[in-house]
Image (spheres, grey):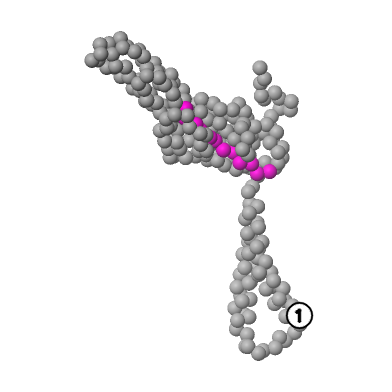
Amino acid sequence: MVELSKIALKCDRLSAIVSKQPPKRKVHTMKNSRLIFTLLALCLALPFTVATGQAQQQPSAKATAKTSSLTLIPETTGTGDWVTVLCNNIKTPNKKDLFVTASFEAGLYTLTEVFGSGTSNAQARVQVRVLLDGQEVEPGPIAYAERIQTLSADLTEAERIEFILRTVAAASFSYVAVDVPVGVHTVCVQARVDTDGTGDFRAFGAVGKGTLTVEEVRLIKGEDVVAVE
């Protein structure tokens, strides 16, 4: 980058010298003419060289991380789609394995209510999974928070009972990607809220602050990472 800065400075000086030349003044020697044209060509190529260098600046790294202090998924009811909450890139210089850790605040809200006699049920769950270049990383979706809440009552028709529970807790899990090839890879974390119930109920799930860390490692050769039942 220092050499490029020096060349850029010379280009500026050259432009100033050329602009000061008299309109019909002859070039003294062929050597000076060739030098000027060479420097001009270099100046024209310089922006392209800098842009190309910046495009290939993704360095190889042993680890990378990303964090968010915002609410990544607001309170959601029903079965939602997978939502990408955090992403980051990592470049592997050799065929390696990746440890991916996703940590998030997971919140659940459940309300069950009974008028007179009966039973109501509320279910809420927050799931998280990791994708490497669009492919699911083992061990797959993990429940970061889950609750099944049931309320039964035997009251008169004029009586009502209600039970509300709202919790927020941090959860973390490590995922393993084996034999990752050489190159730049995209690691993304996705979350999904799943709620259901019967009777008079309400159920919500949410994902709050979160952190994604990716670490490049080399596991023992022949290690059976994925257990098969």
- Residue where numbered disc 1 is placed: 31
Q: Position of residue 207 (x, y in %)?
A: 45, 33
| Quadrant assignment, res 199 | top left
Q: Quadrant of the C terminus?
A: top right
The residue positioned 71% from the left and 76% from the top of the image is 37
On the image, the x and y values in percent for residue 11 come to 63, 72
Q: Quadrant of residue 46?
A: bottom right
Place of residue 172 in the rendered image (x, y in percent of width and height, measured from the top left): 51, 28
Magenta segment's dominant SS is: strand
The spot of residue 4 in percent (x, y) is 64, 63
Res. 35 visible in picture = yes
Could you tell me which residue is drawn at 67 percent across and 20 percent down?
A: 228
Q: Is residue 170 magenta?
A: no
Label 1 Cα neighbours within 10 Å, binned few <14 / some 14-19 / many ≥20: few
Q: Is residue 162 left or right of residue 211?
A: left
Element at badge 1? helix
Report the magenta residues as a range. Answer: 183-194
Residue situated in front as seen by the camera: 39 or 154 = 154
